[in-house]
Image (cartoon, rainbow, N blue to C red):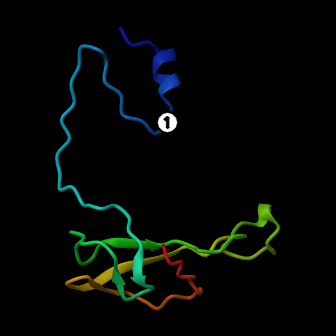
C-alpha cells in the first residue's frame, strides 16, 4: 500500500507507479531533445524531427550568467532565449525572432 510518506518522498514533479502497477505513456518522441547549433540561429548540427510551432531554447554560452556568480544584476538574470520554430528546411531552422545575446561557438 502506498502511504502519504511514500508520495511525499517522490517529490512534487514525479510520476510514480507502485510495485504491482504499470504505466503506459503515449505520444510522439522528439529526438534529440538538444543539439549544438552548427551556426547560431541558422541550423542544427544533428538531424532532428522537431516540428514547426514547437518552442526552442537557445541557451547561454556565458560563463557568468547568474547574479550569484558575480555578474551584474539584470532582468532577466540569464541569457537563455526562447523562440518558436517558424520553418524547417533540412538542417536549417527559422526562428520566430532574432538572437538578442551573442553566443560563443566552441569548436569540439
- Residue 78's spot in the image, x, y percent? 64, 71
Q: Would you say 24 lies left or right of 36 here?
A: left
Residue positioned most to the bottom: 98
Up/down of 66 relative to 74, above or below:
above
Residue positioned most to the top: 1
- Residue 108's spot in the image, x, y percent? 48, 72
Residue 52 placement: quadrant: bottom left
- Residue 17's spot in the image, x, y percent? 31, 24
Residue plotted at (53% across, 82% down): 105
Residue positioned most to the front: 108
Q: Which residue is mark 1?
A: 12
Label 1, secondary structure: give it: loop
Mark 1 burial class by Cα count in 10 Å: few <14, some 14-19, many 20+: few
Q: Would you say 67 lies left or right of 22 here?
A: right
**Which residue is at the front of the view, 24 or 102?**
102
**Which residue is at the front of the view, 58 or 38?**
38
Q: Would you say 21 lies left or right of 58 here?
A: left
Amino acid at each position: 500500500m502506498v502511504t502519504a510518506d511514500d508520495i511525499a518522498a517522490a517529490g512534487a514533479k514525479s510520476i510514480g507507479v507502485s510495485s504491482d502497477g504499470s504505466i503506459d505513456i503515449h505520444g510522439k518522441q522528439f529526438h534529440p531533445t538538444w543539439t549544438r547549433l552548427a551556426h547560431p540561429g541558422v541550423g542544427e548540427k544533428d538531424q532532428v524531427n522537431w516540428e514547426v510551432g514547437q518552442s526552442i531554447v537557445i541557451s547561454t554560452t556565458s560563463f557568468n550568467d547568474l547574479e550569484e556568480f558575480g555578474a551584474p544584476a539584470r532582468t532577466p538574470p540569464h541569457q537563455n532565449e526562447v523562440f518558436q520554430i517558424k520553418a524547417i528546411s533540412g538542417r536549417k531552422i527559422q526562428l520566430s525572432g532574432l538572437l538578442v545575446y551573442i553566443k560563443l561557438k566552441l569548436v569540439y
